[in-house]
Image (cartoon, helix red, strand yellow):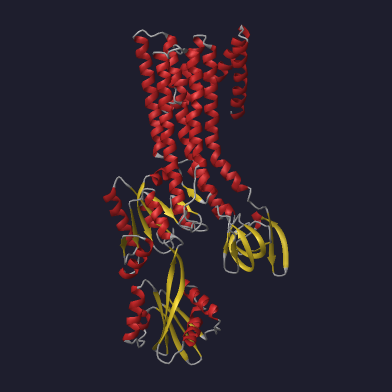
Amino acid sequence: MYLFDIGLIAATTLALAASFLMHTAGSDAVLAALSFLGLVPVVISAGKSLWHRRISVDLLASIALAFSLIAHEWSSAAFITLMLAFARVFDRITDAKAKKVIASLMKYHVEDVRIQTGETVREIHISQVKPGDHVIVESGDRMPIDGTVISGEAEVDESSLTGESELVPKRAGDRVFTATMSESGSLIVRAEKIGKDSTLARIMALVEEASRKKSRAERAADTFTQWYIGATLVASSAMWYFGMTPNEILAILLVVCADDIAVAVPLGFTASIARAAKRGIIVKGSAAMEQLARMKYVLTDKTGTLTKGKPRVVDVRTYGSYSTNTVLNRAGMGASESKHAVSKAIIQYITEKGISIHAAHHFTEISGQGVEFSHGTEKMLLGRLSLMEKQNVKVHEQVKRDIALEKDAGKGVVVLAIDGVVAGVVSYEDELRPHAKEILAETRELGVREWHMLTGDNEHAAAAVAAMVGIRHYHADMTPESKMAFVHKFEREKEPAVVAYIGDGVNDAASLALADVSIAMGGIGSDAAIEAADITLMKDRLDRLPVAMRSAQQMHAVMIQSFIIWAVTNAFGLAWVVIGIPGLGVLGPAGAAAYNFLTDFIPIGNAMRAGLWIKGSKKK
């Protein structure tokens, strides 16, 4: 059908040009034949819509085209044919936008993979790779799978997924993702997600899903089009009844045909969503884009959203005769056997201090509390204050006061006990995201009225973080259940204003699902983020939020402009048909068809600008 329409446009354009330059009976016959040919797909489409009890633009257009042919208005019929063929081509472009993004992602797909088994290296097809295989990635290679680096170091370009050109260093323990490229260095990666389970495949599925979801604006445009066409047909019948000539009625029908706005609205949304995807912002359909444009309240988690979610040791206190080096050495023994984020922070801190870490002789992890371990004759505990109290560790009042002060300052603490006595306290904090305060201020400039921080931290810790990022409304000591209840209640109180929830997509999945529009931070590689959120920021940079907001608001502005352009051009055309323009006279059917055809490109061209308007955040 696409090639048919392209051919029809080319042939009709040439026939019209020939008709105007050298009008002959032969040129009229060619225009008539092309118009009859163009009538066929329009009538079929209108019939399908009527079968499904819908009135479409094609019904009005087929009536206008049929009347033009009956009245021997060959030029009018030719312009209608051109108009409808172009509408179908633009509609095809709308559908192809998502496919184009998918195709651009597909070029990153790797077919041949090198696998290391012991000392043997062999090359196999990507379909033969299994989870657990050791995949070799050399400098200049793209990652064929999602996985974890086992050995080697490399600078990796993740721009294909995140839109960020800055290279990311990767070494043992770091995760890598399909379609990213090793710019320098070699890696051996343990395969974890392959094929349809990979991050790349999931993004492609989301983009395809987004193209099928209609926003309220698109649904409103569809409904408006149906009522508009129905009203036009009724008005045409009334005009016939009150004595208007067929040519006058035909001219009016040709001017008011609404095919341009029916194409412009979905085309604009698709262009905007496709452009956002290239910047690492995955939007699940135009409905989410529309909600984001109207967002007035933001509820946010703290850890992993306003903060990096990566603890950093900031202080070590010692008690009794224990030195700082001794406390760190013993804390390192317990932390080295644990995979907890705080344990990793302790190990990093000890490594930076150049203190050696010995292996524990006995190790037991106590879920949610800490670890118990020994070295030589020493028996030790590393964990929460509550663990020390449960294990009957002697905790002096000075230790309790120090811990309270650290917590009030927004810090977390880990207590080390040696042989039943507290030897030291390690304080840590979660770093704020860069420029968080400025970024939140930028969202307020874009229309956000209030930010509310929901956190499990105590009142003092929550107040400290809220003050640093410029949030007036914070809610402390919250559980996942209380967050859900808060989101539900808040949305009901603020209706019809749009309420957004921002979380890390893992711990906040339920709250994300409740919000009018949900935004997941750090979605790269996170299944929960991709599944739970309407909008996923594929890299954990908070400055992507103003980018997404600005894009959505500009998309909304483009849609309003397109409707205004359509209304103004239609009003001017109607005036020209009904009362005429001084010096130009009254517009007849052929002129009305030409006018409609030419003005169709204005709202459609305006809508296509939506994909070009995404600007960056003020803070990089």
In the displayed structure, 453 sits above or below 4; it is below
Quadrant of the image occupied by residue 213: top left
Q: Position of residue 458 (x, y in %)?
A: 32, 70
The answer to whether any part of residue 608 appears in the image is: yes
In the displayed structure, 179 sits above or below 421; it is above
The answer to whether any part of residue 39 appears in the image is: no
Q: Position of residue 85 (x, y in %)?
A: 55, 25
Q: Is residue 161 left or right of residue 413?
A: right
Quadrant of the image occupied by residue 164: bottom right
Q: Is residue 360 left or right of residue 179?
A: left
Q: Is residue 136 left or right of residue 372?
A: right
Q: Quadrant of the N terminus?
A: top right
| Residue placed furthest toward the front | 583
Q: How many marks?
A: 0
Q: Position of residue 378 (x, y in %)?
A: 47, 90
Q: Nearer the viewer, residue 355 or 479?
A: 355
Q: Position of residue 580 (x, y in %)?
A: 42, 13
**x 48%, y 87%: residue:** 326
**x 64%, y 64%: residue:** 154
